[in-house]
Amino acid sequence: MLVGLRLAVGFYTPTAVGYVQLPGIIIASTVTCWSVICFLRCPRRPIALKLIALVLASFAIFCTLDFLVDYCAVKM
């Protein structure tokens, strides 16, 4: 997950209003989908693994939504 988000941030444009370009958003969305799938497929017991999957999935969702909001704000 961290490798995928790091690749997505590589498409950042350092302008006055910086944003992540569309290929970065696609990579981040793919990482988010896989993180959510891992969270849903993780068994209920042991709880620690489920919590780790939840934290990683929520971080990926937050980053993807942030990239998407910035991209839409600049393009509109």
Image (cartoon, helix red, strand yellow):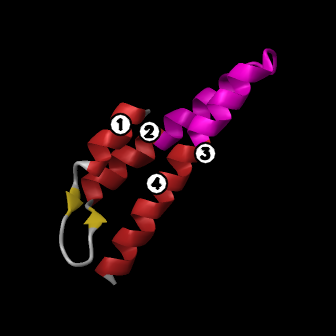
Which numbered disc covers residue 58? 3
Amino acid type at image mark 2: Val
Secondary structure category for the residue under label 3: helix
Q: Looking at the image, which residue is at 60% across and 27% down?
A: 38
Q: Circle 2 sits in a helix, a strand or a loop, which is it?
A: helix
Distance between the Cα atoms at labels 1 and 3? 15 Å
- How far, Cα to Cα, is label 4 from label 2? 9 Å
- Residue range (magenta): 32-57
Q: Is residue 38 in the magenta section?
A: yes
Residue hosting label 4? 64
Kindly identify the residue that appears in the image at 73 percent across and 21 percent down. 48
What type of secondary structure mainly makes up the magenta span?
helix
| Amino acid type at mark 4 | Thr
Q: CA distance from mark 1 to mark 4?
A: 11 Å
Mark drawn on residue 26 = none
Q: Which residue is mark 1?
A: 4
Tell me the tag on residue 31: 2
